[in-house]
Structures are given as structure tokens and as C-alpha cells.
Amino acid sequence: MTETPTLLDNVSQTFRDHGLTAAITALMGGSLAVAATVTRKAFTNEAMLERLEHELATERERYDNQRAEDRRADAARLERIETDVRAMRDLMFEAFQRSRAD
């Protein structure tokens, strides 16, 4: 049964066969891999930042809509309270006027 060589075995054999050329090629390949990883990470972070900004804008819009709705509800409630206060004031005024007329 023959064993297949591992990646490490292949790399070792390449260094033995080609020496300095393989080392320089590996260094350049590694540098390109690091650059690709950094670039991918930067674009991923940029996309995540854009998505978070979009979610923040959506949340702010929802919050502003909720505040506007709450303000409308408060204004309507205040109007009802003022109407009730006026009605009670008028009722008390009438009652006071009647008691003076009697």
C-alpha cells in the first residue's frame, strides 16, 4: 500500500529540488495571499458597516414614526381633556348662576 505524500512532504521536496527559487516563490505567494486576505477583510468590513448604517437609518425612521404617532395621540388626548375641562367649567358656571337666581 503506497502512501500519498502530504502537503508538507511536497513542500519539503520542492525546497530540496529548487532551493532558493522555491523560497522566493513561496514568499511572493504568501505575500499575495496575505494581501488578498486583508483586501477581502476590508471589503467585508465595509459591507458590514454599510449594512449597519442601513439598519440604523431604518431604526431611526421607525423611532421617528413612533414618536410622531405618540405626539398625535397625546395631542388628541390633551384636546379631549381641554374639552372636558371647558364643559365642567361651563356646567359649574351655570350651576352657580342658577343658585344666585334662586
Image (spheres, rainbow, N blue to C red):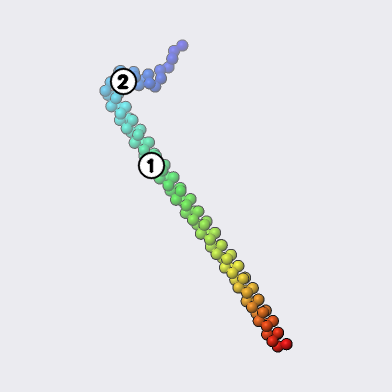
- Mark 2 vs 1: CB contact within 8 A: no
Which residue bears the numbered disc 1? 42
Q: CA distance from mark 2 to mark 1?
A: 33 Å
Q: Is 42 above or below relative to 19?
A: below
In front of the other: 67 or 7: 67
Residue extending farthest top: 1
Q: Quadrant of residue 20?
A: top left
Instruction: Say what secondary structure mark 1 lies in.
Output: helix
Tell me which amino acid carries mark 2. Phe
Label 2 CA crowd tier, 10 Å (few <14, some 14–19, many 20+): some
Residue extending farthest right: 102
Q: Is 95 above or below relative to 31?
A: below
In front of the other: 86 or 69: 86
Which residue bears the numbered disc 2? 15
- Percent coordinates x, y for residue 53 in the rendering: 44, 50
- Percent coordinates x, y for residue 24 in the rendering: 28, 27
Q: Could you say which disc has been placed on residue 100 in the image?
A: none
| Residue found 35% across the figure and 34% down from its top | 34
Q: Which quadrant of the figure contains the C terminus?
A: bottom right
In the displayed structure image, the side of residue 98 where residue 43 appears, left or right: left
| Residue found 57% across the figure and 66% down from its top | 74
Tell me which amino acid carries mark 1. Ala
In the displayed structure image, the side of residue 43 where residue 90 appears, left or right: right
In the displayed structure image, the side of residue 13 where residue 88 appears, left or right: right
| Residue found 30% across the figure and 28% down from its top | 27
Q: Quadrant of residue 21?
A: top left
Instruction: Say what secondary structure mark 2 lies in.
Output: helix
Residue extending farthest bottom: 101
Label 1 CA crowd tier, 10 Å (few <14, some 14–19, many 20+): few
Q: Quadrant of residue 66?
A: bottom right
- Percent coordinates x, y for residue 44 in the rendering: 41, 42
| Residue found 65% across the figure and 79% down from its top | 90
